[in-house]
């Protein structure tokens, strides 16, 4: 037996921690038992199955880890495939186990002992191996990007820059159908995490590479890069000096008063009043929504008038600017040539800056600079276009009054005139600016319509056989077939006694009549009119009581005469009678023939014999019978066309079901309401809802979850752009990643 000894202070502390740990475990089991007591359907069998699955998961992880190490070292994915197929569990469970194993083995590769400064080859090979596993359906498609994110989180910025070259080289692979949809959000999150770690001034090149990669990876209509909500960069604040600083600087420059007085007529009078008005306009350019307030509008309009009047009073000289331009060109040549070295020219040319200095002493020179003046005038035009445009997320109260619109119109004309007068090439610069603003207006309208996907001018090609033919020198486009299979359509058409031609128009024409040759002999294909019908108007014109001049008669129309001769040769016996009269003109001949036809008409044949009348009646009966047969054929065609239209509508409905966008369901709305209950009001205001509307919707409720659920239902039913994708984009912009995860899992 061990000898007893008194406990030390450290031993007592350890025992105290152990006892507290035992108490926590007991409380946990008590809570679990109390929780399980409320579940009546839980049985011992289910508990056993859950424990068996857990044990099986651990076995799969251990087996897959050994297989992954061996397979990665030999660069042979077949070894991993064999081990993957050993287990009889579901594919989702096996993929989940392998996903965890891939991340576990990556931690071993990221250990400090295996890291080499600047060497990222091992991790590139590991990501490539994971991509092969994804293509073999061994793991989730998101795993390569998840592993990349883990690697970037563990590396230094220098190593991250080397590894990012691998991401750039495989941009076409990330855009494949297997990876694009599951991985686009993870890739965007990974790039944003890298940008947060980088400095815009120190790591400018790396930041640019990341932004270029995102521009290549995402399509042009990707909503995450379009600023759909029309937010402004309110952090871009322009700071300028106070009045005390300006007076101190001016007092220190009183030594050369006489020289300044001699040149006063050639400069703009700059005082602190003009200086403060000029730079205070940048706050309105930064946040244009201030202009919709009456007080801020008065301030903006008065300051703008002062600045524009200063521009108008001092016009730039084109000759002076042209001399400066020549100097800039001479100094802006490349410094690589020998001539630049010999002449001592400056290596840098004309410089352009995103932001100008705001010192009061520089304003006089800045107002004399044509580039600076153009920047300010262009800012005015951009602001005016936004104030007068229709933006979807702009509140209804943000609207200019009639007097404000008139001021904007007059000021725009003044700015355009100043731009045109600003050298060099003022008219061409104004034309370019006008064109750019029109394109910007089209861009804004496209965003208001929901950022529809861009298509070719001809639109999407229809799924028909005739459009499979491609132009010369180009491969035919393979279209995906939607709807019912072709074999089922063919069998269905044969059962109904129809012929399927592959084209809707050809199918309709081919099934007009069961026997096409018999249909060609049908009476409805006899388009030759009767004599009475064709010559009816001409007969009326021969009556003297009609008082129709000879120049306006139908007989003088060449087209009518040519058709009349053909009809007479087919239908009239008078066309072949011999006559001793020499007919020299067609109108005269037609008048004689019309008189004979008029005499033969039933209405004019009161003196006809009974046999002649009987022949006339029989002829009319035959014509009526032909017309009845034609009407019956037309009815049959209409019924068949209705059948074709109904089938076409059914096929269109099937296609519409295939293309139906993702929508919310009740389960998703309940989960989202519980998740966003504390911040649902901020989300509603972000989406453009007014607080008055929200109070009407949730007036009777006190619980935040219930209010959020009611508002979500109202948002889904009233907003045209209400979709899980658009709502997830808004939530991700607000940092609510948990709600975005709920939407991605339930879609």
Image (cartoon, helix red, strand yellow):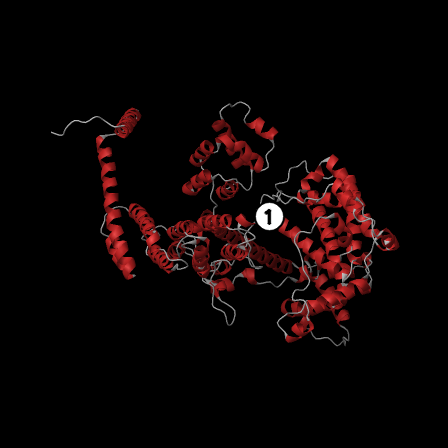
Could you say which is closer to the camera, residue 473 or residue 218?
218
In this rendering, the count of numbered labels is 1
Q: Is residue 546 above or below residue 676?
A: below
Q: Is residue 567 above or below residue 578?
A: above
Could you say which is closer to the camera, residue 546 or residue 614?
546
Assign the N terminus to one quadrant of the image: top left
Q: Position of residue 688 (x, y in %)?
A: 59, 37
Q: Is residue 442 above or below residue 569?
A: above
Q: Position of residue 638 (x, y in %)?
A: 52, 52
- Residue 365, by quadrant, is bottom right
Which residue is rendered at x = 26% and y = 51% of the image? 64
Is residue 169 shown left or right of residue 582? left
Q: Position of residue 110 (x, y in %)?
A: 35, 52
Q: Is residue 160 visible?
A: yes
Could you say which is closer to the camera, residue 526 or residue 136?
136
Q: Is residue 499 visible?
A: no
Q: Position of residue 293 (x, y in %)?
A: 71, 36
Is residue 403 shown left or right of residue 700? right
Q: Is residue 484 above or below residue 298?
A: below
Is residue 412 shown left or right of residue 187? right
Q: Which residue is mark 1?
A: 447
Which residue is rendered at x = 53% and y = 48% of the image? 224
Could you say which is closer to the camera, residue 66 or residue 707?
66
Residue neighbourhood size for the residue with mark 1, other residues' Cα within 10 Å, grouped as few (<14), some (14–19), many (≥20): many
- Classify mark 1: helix, strand or loop: helix
Assign the C terminus to one quadrant of the image: top left
């Amino acid at each position: 037996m061990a000898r007893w000894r008194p406990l030390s202070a450290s031993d007592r502390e350890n025992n105290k921690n152990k006892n507290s740990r035992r108490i926590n475990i007991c409380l946990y089991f008590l809570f679990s038992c109390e929780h399980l007591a409320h579940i009546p359907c839980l049985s011992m069998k289910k508990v056993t199955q859950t424990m068996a699955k857990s044990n099986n998961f651990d076995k799969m992880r251990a087996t897959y880890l050994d297989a992954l190490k061996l397979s990665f070292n030999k660069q042979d994915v077949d070894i991993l495939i064999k081990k993957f197929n050993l287990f009889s569990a579901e594919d989702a469970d096996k993929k989940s186990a392998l996903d965890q194993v891939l991340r576990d083995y990556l931690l071993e590769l990221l250990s400090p002992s295996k890291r080499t400064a600047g060497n990222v080859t091992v991790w590139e090979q590991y990501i490539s191996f994971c991509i092969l596993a994804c293509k073999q359906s061994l793991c989730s498609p998101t795993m390569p990007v998840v592993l990349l994110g883990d690697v970037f989180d563990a590396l230094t910025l220098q190593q991250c820059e080397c590894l990012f070259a691998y991401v750039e080289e495989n941009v076409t692979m990330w855009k494949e159908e297997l990876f694009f949809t599951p991985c686009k959000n993870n890739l965007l999150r990974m790039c944003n995490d890298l940008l947060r770690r980088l400095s815009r001034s120190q790591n400018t090149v790396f930041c640019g590479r990341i932004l270029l990669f995102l521009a290549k990876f995402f399509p042009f209509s990707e909503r995450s890069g379009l600023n759909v909500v029309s937010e402004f960069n309110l952090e871009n604040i322009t700071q300028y000096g106070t009045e005390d600083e300006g007076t101190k600087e001016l007092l220190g420059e009183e030594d050369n008063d006489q020289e300044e007085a001699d040149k006063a007529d050639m400069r703009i009078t700059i005082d602190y009043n003009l200086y403060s008005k000029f730079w205070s306009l940048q706050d309105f350019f930064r946040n244009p929504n201030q202009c919709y307030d009456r007080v801020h509008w008065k301030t903006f309009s008065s300051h703008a008038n002062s600045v524009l009047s200063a521009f108008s009073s001092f016009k730039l000289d084109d000759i002076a600017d042209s001399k400066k331009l020549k100097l800039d060109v001479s100094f802006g040549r490349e410094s690589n040539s020998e001539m630049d070295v010999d002449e001592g020219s400056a290596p840098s040319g004309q410089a352009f800056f995103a932001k100008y200095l705001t010192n009061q002493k520089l304003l006089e020179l800045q107002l004399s600079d044509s580039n600076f003046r153009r920047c300010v005038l262009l800012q005015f035009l951009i602001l005016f276009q936004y104030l007068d445009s229709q933006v979807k997320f702009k509140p209804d109260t943000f609207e200019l009054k009639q007097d404000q619109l008139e001021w904007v119109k007059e000021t725009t004309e003044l700015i355009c005139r100043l731009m045109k007068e600003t050298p060099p090439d003022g008219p061409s610069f104004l034309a370019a600016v006008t064109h750019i603003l029109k394109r910007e207006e089209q861009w804004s309208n496209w965003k208001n319509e929901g950022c529809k996907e861009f298509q070719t001018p001809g639109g999407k090609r229809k799924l028909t056989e005739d459009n499979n033919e491609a132009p010369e020198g180009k491969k035919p486009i393979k279209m995906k077939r939607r709807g019912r299979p072709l074999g089922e359509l063919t069998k269905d058409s044969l059962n109904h006694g129809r012929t399927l031609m592959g084209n809707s128009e050809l199918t309709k024409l081919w099934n007009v009549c069961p026997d096409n040759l018999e249909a060609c002999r049908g009476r409805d294909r006899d388009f030759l009119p009767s004599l009475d019908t064709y010559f009816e108007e001409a007969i009326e014109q021969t009556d003297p009581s009609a008082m129709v001049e000879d120049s306006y008669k139908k007989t003088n129309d060449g087209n009518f005469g040519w058709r009349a001769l053909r009809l007479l040769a087919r239908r009239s016996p008078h066309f072949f009678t011999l006559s001793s009269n020499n007919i020299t003109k067609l109108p005269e001949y037609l008048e004689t023939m019309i008189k004979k036809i008029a005499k033969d008409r039933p209405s004019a044949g009161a003196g006809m014999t009974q046999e002649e009348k009987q022949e006339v009646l029989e002829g009319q009966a035959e014509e009526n019978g032909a017309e009845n047969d034609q009407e019956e054929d037309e009815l049959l065609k209409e019924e068949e066309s209705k059948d074709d239209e109904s089938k076409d509508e059914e096929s269109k409905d099937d296609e519409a079901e295939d293309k139906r966008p993702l929508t919310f369901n009740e389960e998703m709305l309940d989960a989202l309401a519980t998740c966003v209950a504390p911040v649902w009001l901020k989300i509603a205001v972000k989406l453009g809802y007014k607080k008055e509307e929200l109070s009407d919707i949730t007036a009777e409720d006190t619980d935040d979850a219930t209010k959020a659920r009611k508002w979500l239902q109202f948002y889904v039913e009233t907003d045209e752009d209400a979709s899980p994708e658009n709502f997830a984009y808004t939530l991700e912009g607000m940092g609510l990643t948990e709600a975005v995860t709920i939407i991605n899992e339930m879609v």
